[in-house]
Amino acid sequence: MQKILVVDDAELNRELLWEMLKDEYEIEMAENGDEALSLLGRYGCDLTAVLLDLQMPKKDGFSVIIEMKSSGLIKKVPVLVISGEYDVEVENQCFQLGVSDFIHKPFVGSIVKNRVKNTIDLFECKNQLELKVIEQEETLREQDQIIRIQEEKLREAKEFNRLMMEYRSAIMEVETRLKVLNGEFSQEYNRNPFESIKSRLKSPASIYEKMGRRGFPVTVESIRENLTDVAGLRVICSFPDDIYRLADLFIRQDDIILIRRKDYISNPKPNGYRSLHLIVDVPIFLSHEKKYMKVEVQFRTIAMDFWASLEHKLKYKKDVDNTDEIEKLLKTCADSIEELDYQMQEIRNKIDREK
Protein backbone atom coordinates (compact mmCIF):
# COMPACT_ATOMS: atom_id res chain seq x y z
CA MET A 1 0.00 0.00 0.00
CA GLN A 2 1.10 3.60 -0.60
CA LYS A 3 2.36 5.33 2.53
CA ILE A 4 0.96 8.67 3.75
CA LEU A 5 2.19 10.85 6.60
CA VAL A 6 -0.49 12.66 8.62
CA VAL A 7 0.81 15.53 10.79
CA ASP A 8 -1.58 17.21 13.26
CA ASP A 9 -1.26 18.11 16.93
CA ALA A 10 -4.91 17.15 17.57
CA GLU A 11 -5.24 13.38 18.15
CA LEU A 12 -8.90 13.49 17.08
CA ASN A 13 -7.97 14.90 13.66
CA ARG A 14 -5.27 12.26 13.18
CA GLU A 15 -7.72 9.49 14.08
CA LEU A 16 -10.42 10.87 11.77
CA LEU A 17 -8.02 10.99 8.81
CA TRP A 18 -6.67 7.54 9.65
CA GLU A 19 -10.22 6.15 9.65
CA MET A 20 -11.01 7.80 6.28
CA LEU A 21 -7.83 6.65 4.52
CA LYS A 22 -6.77 3.39 6.21
CA ASP A 23 -8.42 1.12 3.64
CA GLU A 24 -6.41 2.58 0.76
CA TYR A 25 -3.16 3.78 2.32
CA GLU A 26 -0.66 2.86 5.00
CA ILE A 27 -0.75 5.73 7.49
CA GLU A 28 2.15 7.15 9.49
CA MET A 29 1.27 9.83 12.06
CA ALA A 30 3.10 12.70 13.79
CA GLU A 31 1.80 15.19 16.33
CA ASN A 32 4.21 18.08 15.63
CA GLY A 33 6.75 19.42 13.14
CA ASP A 34 9.77 17.81 14.79
CA GLU A 35 8.23 14.33 14.60
CA ALA A 36 7.16 15.03 11.01
CA LEU A 37 10.71 15.96 9.95
CA SER A 38 12.07 12.88 11.69
CA LEU A 39 9.65 10.64 9.74
CA LEU A 40 10.37 12.53 6.52
CA GLY A 41 14.06 11.84 7.08
CA ARG A 42 13.34 8.15 7.62
CA TYR A 43 10.92 7.54 4.73
CA GLY A 44 11.74 10.34 2.27
CA CYS A 45 10.48 9.55 -1.22
CA ASP A 46 8.83 6.34 0.01
CA LEU A 47 6.01 8.59 1.19
CA THR A 48 3.23 9.12 -1.34
CA ALA A 49 1.86 12.29 0.28
CA VAL A 50 2.01 14.41 3.42
CA LEU A 51 -1.13 15.80 5.10
CA LEU A 52 0.15 18.68 7.21
CA ASP A 53 -1.48 20.94 9.79
CA LEU A 54 -0.14 24.51 9.92
CA GLN A 55 -0.75 25.46 13.56
CA MET A 56 1.23 23.13 15.85
CA PRO A 57 3.45 23.50 18.94
CA LYS A 58 7.26 23.15 18.85
CA LYS A 59 7.59 23.40 15.07
CA ASP A 60 4.63 24.49 12.96
CA GLY A 61 3.60 23.39 9.48
CA PHE A 62 5.21 26.36 7.75
CA SER A 63 8.60 25.36 9.16
CA VAL A 64 8.12 21.81 7.86
CA ILE A 65 7.19 23.11 4.41
CA ILE A 66 10.20 25.44 4.31
CA GLU A 67 12.59 22.61 5.25
CA MET A 68 11.01 20.31 2.66
CA LYS A 69 11.43 23.05 0.07
CA SER A 70 15.04 23.64 1.12
CA SER A 71 15.89 19.95 0.80
CA GLY A 72 14.00 19.57 -2.50
CA LEU A 73 11.68 16.96 -0.99
CA ILE A 74 8.56 19.03 -1.69
CA LYS A 75 9.17 18.43 -5.41
CA LYS A 76 9.18 14.68 -4.81
CA VAL A 77 6.40 14.27 -2.24
CA PRO A 78 3.13 16.25 -2.54
CA VAL A 79 1.98 18.21 0.52
CA LEU A 80 -1.70 18.80 1.31
CA VAL A 81 -2.29 21.36 4.05
CA ILE A 82 -5.02 20.42 6.55
CA SER A 83 -6.33 23.60 8.08
CA GLY A 84 -9.40 25.30 9.47
CA GLU A 85 -8.28 28.63 7.99
CA TYR A 86 -9.68 30.07 4.79
CA ASP A 87 -7.29 33.01 4.63
CA VAL A 88 -6.42 33.69 0.98
CA GLU A 89 -3.01 35.12 1.87
CA VAL A 90 -2.13 32.02 3.88
CA GLU A 91 -3.16 29.75 0.99
CA ASN A 92 -1.19 31.83 -1.52
CA GLN A 93 1.88 31.69 0.71
CA CYS A 94 1.58 27.91 0.94
CA PHE A 95 1.19 27.51 -2.82
CA GLN A 96 4.23 29.73 -3.41
CA LEU A 97 6.23 27.42 -1.15
CA GLY A 98 5.20 24.41 -3.25
CA VAL A 99 2.12 23.00 -1.48
CA SER A 100 -0.07 20.94 -3.80
CA ASP A 101 -3.55 21.39 -2.29
CA PHE A 102 -5.68 22.16 0.78
CA ILE A 103 -8.07 20.01 2.84
CA HIS A 104 -10.21 22.19 5.06
CA LYS A 105 -11.63 21.29 8.46
CA PRO A 106 -14.12 19.94 9.38
CA PHE A 107 -13.23 16.87 7.32
CA VAL A 108 -15.68 15.29 4.87
CA GLY A 109 -14.67 11.72 4.02
CA SER A 110 -15.44 11.81 0.29
CA ILE A 111 -13.65 15.15 -0.18
CA VAL A 112 -10.59 14.00 1.77
CA LYS A 113 -10.32 10.77 -0.26
CA ASN A 114 -10.78 12.53 -3.60
CA ARG A 115 -8.34 15.35 -2.87
CA VAL A 116 -5.68 12.92 -1.68
CA LYS A 117 -6.19 10.59 -4.65
CA ASN A 118 -6.28 13.41 -7.22
CA THR A 119 -3.17 15.06 -5.78
CA ILE A 120 -1.23 11.77 -5.79
CA ASP A 121 -2.37 10.97 -9.35
CA LEU A 122 -1.52 14.46 -10.65
CA PHE A 123 1.86 14.42 -8.91
CA GLU A 124 2.64 11.03 -10.40
CA CYS A 125 1.67 12.27 -13.88
CA LYS A 126 3.83 15.36 -13.37
CA ASN A 127 6.81 13.21 -12.34
CA GLN A 128 6.32 10.92 -15.34
CA LEU A 129 6.20 13.91 -17.67
CA GLU A 130 9.36 15.32 -16.12
CA LEU A 131 11.08 11.97 -16.62
CA LYS A 132 9.96 11.91 -20.24
CA VAL A 133 11.28 15.44 -20.73
CA ILE A 134 14.63 14.37 -19.24
CA GLU A 135 14.68 11.30 -21.50
CA GLN A 136 13.80 13.42 -24.55
CA GLU A 137 16.50 15.95 -23.68
CA GLU A 138 19.01 13.12 -23.41
CA THR A 139 17.81 11.72 -26.75
CA LEU A 140 18.16 15.17 -28.33
CA ARG A 141 21.66 15.51 -26.90
CA GLU A 142 22.58 12.12 -28.35
CA GLN A 143 21.06 13.07 -31.72
CA ASP A 144 22.90 16.38 -31.64
CA GLN A 145 26.13 14.53 -30.93
CA ILE A 146 25.46 12.17 -33.84
CA ILE A 147 24.74 15.14 -36.11
CA ARG A 148 27.99 16.82 -35.06
CA ILE A 149 29.95 13.61 -35.73
CA GLN A 150 28.30 13.19 -39.13
CA GLU A 151 28.87 16.88 -39.85
CA GLU A 152 32.59 16.41 -39.27
CA LYS A 153 32.59 13.32 -41.48
CA LEU A 154 30.80 15.28 -44.22
CA ARG A 155 33.25 18.16 -43.90
CA GLU A 156 36.15 15.77 -44.29
CA ALA A 157 34.68 13.89 -47.27
CA LYS A 158 36.30 14.95 -50.53
CA GLU A 159 33.18 14.26 -52.62
CA PHE A 160 31.02 16.32 -50.26
CA ASN A 161 33.44 19.24 -50.36
CA ARG A 162 33.39 19.12 -54.14
CA LEU A 163 29.58 19.16 -54.06
CA MET A 164 29.62 22.25 -51.83
CA MET A 165 32.06 23.89 -54.25
CA GLU A 166 29.62 23.21 -57.09
CA TYR A 167 26.73 24.73 -55.12
CA ARG A 168 28.85 27.81 -54.35
CA SER A 169 29.58 28.08 -58.07
CA ALA A 170 25.83 27.90 -58.80
CA ILE A 171 25.20 30.73 -56.32
CA MET A 172 27.85 32.87 -58.04
CA GLU A 173 26.29 32.07 -61.43
CA VAL A 174 22.83 33.23 -60.31
CA GLU A 175 24.27 36.34 -58.65
CA THR A 176 26.17 37.27 -61.81
CA ARG A 177 23.14 36.90 -64.05
CA LEU A 178 20.94 38.96 -61.75
CA LYS A 179 23.59 41.66 -61.44
CA VAL A 180 23.86 41.82 -65.23
CA LEU A 181 20.09 42.37 -65.46
CA ASN A 182 20.34 44.99 -62.74
CA GLY A 183 23.08 46.80 -64.62
CA GLU A 184 21.08 46.72 -67.85
CA PHE A 185 18.03 48.20 -66.13
CA SER A 186 20.16 50.89 -64.56
CA GLN A 187 21.49 51.83 -67.99
CA GLU A 188 18.22 51.65 -69.93
CA TYR A 189 15.64 52.83 -67.42
CA ASN A 190 17.73 54.74 -64.87
CA ARG A 191 16.61 52.53 -61.98
CA ASN A 192 17.44 49.16 -60.46
CA PRO A 193 14.98 46.26 -60.14
CA PHE A 194 16.52 45.01 -56.90
CA GLU A 195 18.18 46.51 -53.84
CA SER A 196 20.39 43.65 -52.66
CA ILE A 197 21.14 39.93 -52.91
CA LYS A 198 21.78 37.69 -49.92
CA SER A 199 23.10 34.16 -50.40
CA ARG A 200 23.62 31.17 -48.13
CA LEU A 201 24.92 27.61 -48.38
CA LYS A 202 23.22 25.05 -46.14
CA SER A 203 25.51 23.81 -43.37
CA PRO A 204 26.55 20.13 -43.18
CA ALA A 205 24.60 19.78 -39.90
CA SER A 206 21.41 21.15 -41.49
CA ILE A 207 21.87 18.89 -44.51
CA TYR A 208 22.35 15.81 -42.34
CA GLU A 209 19.35 16.67 -40.13
CA LYS A 210 17.03 17.31 -43.08
CA MET A 211 18.08 14.17 -44.96
CA GLY A 212 17.54 12.09 -41.82
CA ARG A 213 14.15 13.68 -41.14
CA ARG A 214 13.02 12.85 -44.68
CA GLY A 215 14.38 9.34 -44.55
CA PHE A 216 16.97 9.76 -47.31
CA PRO A 217 20.48 8.27 -47.20
CA VAL A 218 23.17 10.86 -46.51
CA THR A 219 25.24 10.49 -49.66
CA VAL A 220 26.45 13.05 -52.19
CA GLU A 221 24.14 11.73 -54.90
CA SER A 222 21.19 11.60 -52.50
CA ILE A 223 21.81 15.22 -51.42
CA ARG A 224 22.04 16.31 -55.04
CA GLU A 225 18.85 14.45 -55.94
CA ASN A 226 16.60 15.13 -52.94
CA LEU A 227 17.46 18.60 -51.62
CA THR A 228 16.54 21.72 -53.56
CA ASP A 229 17.60 24.34 -51.03
CA VAL A 230 21.27 23.60 -50.35
CA ALA A 231 22.13 26.70 -52.37
CA GLY A 232 19.84 29.65 -51.73
CA LEU A 233 19.58 33.31 -52.67
CA ARG A 234 17.24 36.03 -51.43
CA VAL A 235 16.71 38.92 -53.83
CA ILE A 236 15.34 42.08 -52.18
CA CYS A 237 13.36 44.33 -54.54
CA SER A 238 11.78 47.73 -54.06
CA PHE A 239 8.34 46.98 -55.53
CA PRO A 240 6.16 43.89 -56.17
CA ASP A 241 6.10 44.36 -59.96
CA ASP A 242 9.92 44.42 -59.97
CA ILE A 243 9.83 40.95 -58.42
CA TYR A 244 7.76 39.47 -61.24
CA ARG A 245 9.64 41.35 -63.97
CA LEU A 246 13.05 40.28 -62.67
CA ALA A 247 11.98 36.67 -62.02
CA ASP A 248 10.48 36.33 -65.51
CA LEU A 249 13.58 37.80 -67.20
CA PHE A 250 15.77 35.41 -65.22
CA ILE A 251 13.87 32.19 -66.00
CA ARG A 252 13.47 33.17 -69.69
CA GLN A 253 17.21 32.77 -70.18
CA ASP A 254 17.54 29.72 -72.43
CA ASP A 255 19.86 27.68 -70.18
CA ILE A 256 17.91 28.23 -66.94
CA ILE A 257 15.49 25.39 -66.19
CA LEU A 258 12.52 26.18 -63.94
CA ILE A 259 11.76 23.20 -61.68
CA ARG A 260 9.14 24.72 -59.40
CA ARG A 261 7.52 28.11 -58.78
CA LYS A 262 5.64 29.02 -55.58
CA ASP A 263 3.95 32.40 -55.53
CA TYR A 264 3.31 33.35 -51.91
CA ILE A 265 2.71 36.97 -52.94
CA SER A 266 -0.48 36.29 -54.88
CA ASN A 267 -1.32 33.45 -52.47
CA PRO A 268 0.19 34.29 -49.05
CA LYS A 269 0.60 31.62 -46.39
CA PRO A 270 -2.07 31.65 -43.63
CA ASN A 271 0.31 33.48 -41.26
CA GLY A 272 0.80 36.31 -43.79
CA TYR A 273 4.18 35.22 -45.23
CA ARG A 274 4.74 36.60 -48.74
CA SER A 275 7.54 35.83 -51.19
CA LEU A 276 8.10 34.42 -54.67
CA HIS A 277 10.06 31.15 -54.62
CA LEU A 278 11.79 29.66 -57.64
CA ILE A 279 13.61 26.34 -57.74
CA VAL A 280 15.83 26.36 -60.81
CA ASP A 281 18.53 24.28 -62.43
CA VAL A 282 21.50 26.52 -63.19
CA PRO A 283 24.48 25.55 -65.36
CA ILE A 284 27.97 25.83 -63.96
CA PHE A 285 31.06 25.54 -66.11
CA LEU A 286 33.84 23.42 -64.65
CA SER A 287 37.23 22.61 -66.17
CA HIS A 288 36.02 19.44 -67.92
CA GLU A 289 32.25 19.67 -67.96
CA LYS A 290 29.07 21.72 -67.81
CA LYS A 291 26.81 20.67 -64.94
CA TYR A 292 23.37 21.72 -63.73
CA MET A 293 22.83 22.50 -60.05
CA LYS A 294 19.60 23.18 -58.16
CA VAL A 295 19.25 26.60 -56.55
CA GLU A 296 16.39 28.14 -54.56
CA VAL A 297 15.84 31.83 -55.31
CA GLN A 298 13.43 33.88 -53.17
CA PHE A 299 12.21 37.30 -54.29
CA ARG A 300 10.82 39.73 -51.69
CA THR A 301 10.25 43.43 -51.28
CA ILE A 302 12.08 45.23 -48.46
CA ALA A 303 8.87 45.18 -46.40
CA MET A 304 8.27 41.47 -47.00
CA ASP A 305 11.83 40.65 -45.96
CA PHE A 306 11.55 42.77 -42.81
CA TRP A 307 8.32 40.97 -41.83
CA ALA A 308 9.68 37.48 -42.58
CA SER A 309 12.90 38.09 -40.60
CA LEU A 310 10.99 39.42 -37.60
CA GLU A 311 8.41 36.62 -37.73
CA HIS A 312 11.18 34.03 -37.80
CA LYS A 313 12.84 35.52 -34.70
CA LEU A 314 9.53 35.63 -32.80
CA LYS A 315 8.54 32.15 -33.90
CA TYR A 316 11.60 30.53 -32.37
CA LYS A 317 11.40 32.31 -29.00
CA LYS A 318 10.72 29.87 -26.18
CA ASP A 319 7.91 29.94 -23.59
CA VAL A 320 5.83 32.56 -25.39
CA ASP A 321 2.28 33.03 -24.07
CA ASN A 322 -0.74 34.13 -26.11
CA THR A 323 0.64 32.67 -29.36
CA ASP A 324 -2.78 32.90 -31.06
CA GLU A 325 -2.95 36.62 -30.34
CA ILE A 326 0.63 37.13 -31.57
CA GLU A 327 -0.14 35.25 -34.80
CA LYS A 328 -3.19 37.45 -35.39
CA LEU A 329 -1.09 40.58 -34.85
CA LEU A 330 1.57 39.30 -37.26
CA LYS A 331 -1.11 38.57 -39.87
CA THR A 332 -2.47 42.11 -39.43
CA CYS A 333 1.04 43.51 -39.90
CA ALA A 334 1.52 41.39 -43.02
CA ASP A 335 -1.71 42.75 -44.51
CA SER A 336 -0.63 46.31 -43.71
CA ILE A 337 2.76 45.71 -45.33
CA GLU A 338 1.09 44.37 -48.47
CA GLU A 339 -1.07 47.48 -48.70
CA LEU A 340 1.99 49.69 -48.17
CA ASP A 341 3.96 47.88 -50.90
CA TYR A 342 1.25 48.52 -53.49
CA GLN A 343 0.69 52.11 -52.35
CA MET A 344 4.41 52.85 -52.82
CA GLN A 345 4.32 51.11 -56.21
CA GLU A 346 1.40 53.29 -57.29
CA ILE A 347 3.28 56.43 -56.17
CA ARG A 348 6.28 55.34 -58.26
CA ASN A 349 4.03 54.67 -61.27
CA LYS A 350 2.45 58.10 -60.92
CA ILE A 351 5.87 59.76 -60.82
CA ASP A 352 6.95 57.78 -63.90
CA ARG A 353 3.79 58.83 -65.83
CA GLU A 354 4.34 62.48 -65.03
CA LYS A 355 7.90 62.25 -66.28
Image (tube, helix red, strand yellow):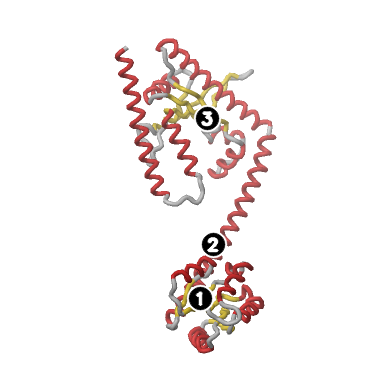
Q: Quadrant of residue 260?
A: top left
- The first of marks 1 and 2 along the sequence is 1
- Residue 232: which numbered mark, if any? 3
Q: Which residue corresponds to mark 1?
A: 81
Q: Which of marks 3 and 2 is in front?
A: 2
Q: Quadrant of residue 40?
A: bottom right
Say which element carries label 2: helix
Distance Cα–Cα, label 3 vs label 2: 40 Å
- Label 1 Cα crowd, 10 Å radius (few <14 / some 14-19 / many 20+): many
**Residue type (three-letter) at the residue carrying disc 3:** Gly
Give the vertical position of 5 relative to 159 (above or below). below
Q: Position of residue 217 (x, y in %)?
A: 59, 41
**Residue type (three-letter) at the residue carrying disc 2:** Leu
- Label 2 Cα crowd, 10 Å radius (few <14 / some 14-19 / many 20+): few
Q: Quadrant of the N terminus?
A: bottom right
**Residue type (three-letter) at the residue carrying disc 1:** Val
Q: In which quarter of the image is residue 284?
A: top right
Q: Which residue corresponds to mark 2?
A: 129
- Residue 162: which numbered mark, if any? none
- The first of marks 3 and 1 along the sequence is 1
Q: Quadrant of the C terminus?
A: top left
Q: In this image, 224 relative to 237: left or right?
A: right
